[in-house]
Image (cartoon, rainbow, N blue to C red):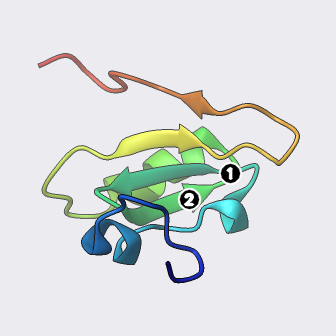
Amino acid sequence: MAAGMRKGMHRDAREKTTRLDRYAGEWIMLVGSKVVAHDRSLAGAILQASRMSLRSKPTVFLVPHKDEGPYLLYGAGQPR
């Protein structure tokens, strides 16, 4: 097994994996596996994303520092 590959992980999944450690402490907006906006403040990340022509609603995620747990927001935005 090649370095960095997990058993049973599909090749496409490995190629599309995004390293998030560089965004530690920042709010990020993801569309698929692509980071489309990031900022230390949620408002800043939302502002960046709102200026883009995104085809789908981004997922909002606060990237934790190594000593923190993960934080996820589900259903962010207005109801449909």
Measured from the top left, where is residue 35 in percent x and y? 44, 64
Which is nearer the eye, 52 or 65? 65
Badge 1 element: loop
Badge 2 crowding class, 10 Å Cα cut-off, few under 14, some 14 to 19, many 20 or more, is many
Left or right: 19 as drawn, with respect to 68 = left
According to the picture, the residue beneath numbered tag 2 turns out to be: 38
Which is nearer the eye, 17 or 27? 17
Q: Residue 55 carries which label?
A: none
Residue type, numbered disc 2: His
Q: Quick one: label 2 or label 1, which is nearer the N terminus? A: 1
Left or right: 6 as drawn, with respect to 51 = right
Q: Residue at x 49, y 78 (%)?
A: 1
Which is nearer the eye, 16 or 11? 11
Extreme residue toward the front, this view: 1
Measured from the top left, where is residue 8 in percent x and y? 36, 58
Residue type, numbered disc 1: Glu
Q: Which residue is drawn at 63% across and 56% down?
A: 39
Measured from the top left, where is residue 9 in percent x and y? 36, 61
Can you tell which quarter of the image residue 77 is in? top left
Badge 1 crowding class, 10 Å Cα cut-off, few under 14, some 14 to 19, many 20 or more, is many
According to the picture, the residue beneath numbered tag 1 turns out to be: 26
